[in-house]
Image (cartoon, rainbow, N blue to C red):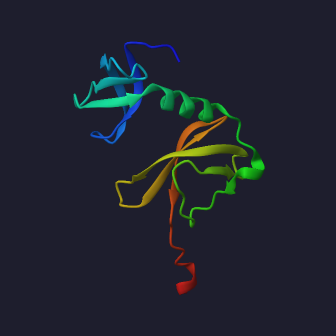
Amino acid sequence: MARGKSISHFCNHCARIAKMEMTGSLENQPEKTWYRCTRCRHASLIDLTELKKIEEESKKKIERSDCSEYRPQNTYTIGQAIFHSEWGDIGKIVSKERTSGGASAIVVSFEKLGERKLLESIVDNSEDG
């Protein structure tokens, strides 16, 4: 990974992926660099070797056998691989959110479809007749 003046990285203060500007590095640890979020201006010390490992891991192809079938009733974890049978696509869960109605949703980065939001933990009330 080339050292640039800015990167996209998860800001712990904003709790979202944001553009981060490089502000300086440590003399005795060149692999660790200070970055400042352009959104909230919060500074973070980022280990670039760890960042490179994560980047390489995310580029690996997901196998269908490693995926869980997506069902809205299930609960999922960030990083989990899922297969959406209706769309015929494989994806990895990148984050969790709440919808405006208060429901739980997952943000999935699919190989073909890109990023999509899907509901999770839906209670099926059809048995209450």
* Residue 70, placed above or below residue 31: below
Tag count: 0
Q: Position of residue 8 (x, y in %)?
A: 42, 26
| Quadrant where the C terminus is found in the figure | bottom right
Furthest residue to the bottom? 129
**Above or below: residue 63 compared with residue 18:** below
**Left or right position of 56 against 43:** right
Drawn side of residue 118 relative to residue 6, left or right: right
- Closer to the camera, 80 or 56? 56
* Residue at the (54%, 42%) spot, across then down: 116
Q: Position of residue 80 (x, y in %)?
A: 59, 51
Q: In the depicted view, which residue is nearer to us: 48 or 109?
A: 48
Percent coordinates x, y for residue 25 in the rendering = 33, 18
Which residue is rendered at x = 40% and y = 19% of the image?
Answer: 30
User: Where, by quadrant of the figure, is residue 43 drawn?
Assistant: top left
- Residue 104 found in image quarter: bottom left
